[in-house]
């Protein structure tokens, strides 16, 4: 695929790296091991570089790690997600700031991008949700890139999480990600994915 | 970080791989080179493995490549996105199927997950939007992992794209991604990201 007209063209990552990120990576229910604060900072320092619209970077993260914080999170969880989340070394609350535009003068200094999003909150909520979700996916893949395993979840009461962790702010919870180290022996068989022609078209 | 209690624990990818995915990867406005159909299938065969809630995999992709398809897309683009999109080897329309639940008997065969999402469409739309956005981020990082450069965009008229490409279906457009090979010499200085303490907390 090299082409003299495109200098410094990147090559594909190694097959082992593609496996670790995508092909053999799995969602884990049981996560153990240790995840230090330095690893969480490394994780942020990778995922923050993922692209968002106008660099709006609306994601706001809470790394729920202490027993006290886990206790605060517990009542919001669906029953099936409770035990595994209490046992995980860290649970990340991936949230997004609906008033992300307040930081655009810093994040997108070339022009007055804040003015594009002033006005009623519901007009900027889809952008916050879309781009905050992208950043949640960057977090999952950055964690895998660092050798961590993930257990992302939507099975919880968003309003309860918002009340417990984001009261008095403009931040809303989006989804949760348990982080740690999984044991491949404890995985179930993998579910199928859609074949190309059911999910994609080339026109 | 090795720990005898966690067998086969993954290591972090190489610094060069972390750079290619996150740290030095950049959004490109000018994209050239060739992107063959086989590369688009490779791309799908990576991104499809990214996790979604109940494996719902709601993303639906249109790879806009031919002059005819580009002409159909053109009128929906914001003025500032027109020329670069017409010039890019491929533009991906990342959409999501609001009736994704119809495929859950295949995608999540262990239980009747479809029944969780039956009923009015607006009740499952947030899940489609959230998980379809995650898959859009997987697409971006999978493209980078394959050595491609990306130019994601939200600056277009979703209703026009839906009318041109998804009329008569339950698929909605989410965002666009130009794909190709960028020239690092043509990049502007990088915009800053939020420091850890402005975007995250460890509790």
Image (spheres, coloured by chain):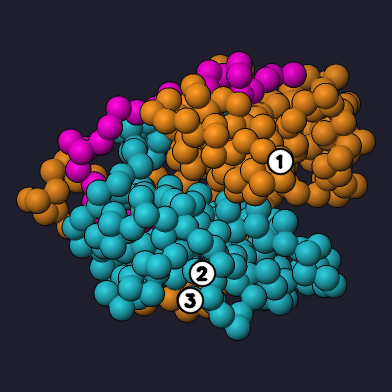
Chain colours: A cyan, B orange
Question: Could you tell me which secondary element the residue under label 1 belongs to?
Answer: loop
Q: At 7% across and 50% down in the image, what residue appears? A: B4
Residue B119 occupies which quadrant of the picture?
top right
Q: Please report contact status of discs 2 and 3: CB closer than 8 Å, yes or no.
A: yes
Residue with the mark numbered 1: B120
Categorize mark 2 by other alpha carbons within 10 Å: few (<14), some (14-19), many (20+). some
C-alpha separation, residue under disc 1 versus residue under disc 3: 30 Å
Q: At 53% across and 18% down in the image, what residue appears? A: A195
Query: Which quadrant would the C terminus of chain A be assigned to in this image?
Result: top right
Instruction: Indicate the chain on which mark 2 is placed.
Output: A
Decide if residue A23 is in sight here: yes
In the picture, measured across the screen, residue A45 lies left or right of residue B136, that is left
Respond whether the residues carrying marks 1 and 2 are from the same subunit: no
Q: Range of the magenta residues?
A: A177-203
Q: Is residue A198 magenta?
A: yes
Q: Nearer the viewer, mark 1 or mark 3?
A: 1
Q: Is residue A86 above or below residue B46?
A: below
C-alpha separation, residue under disc 2 versus residue under disc 3: 6 Å
Percent coordinates x, y for residue B44 in the rendering: 54, 27
Asked whether B106 or A180 is in front, the reply is: B106
Residue with the mark numbered 2: A160
Q: At 21% across and 55% down in the image, what residue appears? A: A32
Q: Please report contact status of discs 1 and 2: CB closer than 8 Å, yes or no.
A: no
């Amino acid at each position: 695929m090299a082409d003299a007209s495109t200098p410094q063209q990147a090559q594909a990552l190694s097959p082992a790296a593609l496996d670790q990120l995508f092909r053999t990576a799995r969602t884990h229910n049981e996560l153990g091991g240790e995840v230090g604060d330095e690893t969480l900072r490394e994780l942020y320092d990778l995922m923050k570089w993922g692209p968002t619209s106008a660099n709006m970077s609306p994601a706001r993260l809470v790394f729920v790690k202490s027993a006290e914080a886990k206790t605060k999170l517990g009542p919001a969880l669906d029953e099936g997600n409770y035990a595994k989340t209490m046992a995980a070394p860290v649970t990340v609350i991936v949230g997004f700031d609906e008033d992300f535009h307040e930081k655009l003068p810093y994040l997108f200094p070339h022009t007055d991008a804040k003015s594009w999003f002033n006005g009623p909150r519901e007009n900027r909520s889809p952008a916050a949700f879309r781009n905050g979700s992208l950043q949640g996916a960057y977090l999952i893949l950055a964690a895998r890139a660092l050798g961590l395993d993930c257990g992302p979840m939507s099975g919880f009461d968003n309003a309860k999480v918002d009340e417990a962790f984001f009261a008095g702010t403009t931040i809303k919870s989006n989804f949760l990600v348990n982080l740690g180290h999984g044991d491949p022996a404890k995985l179930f068989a993998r579910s199928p994915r859609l074949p190309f022609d059911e999910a994609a078209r080339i026109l």
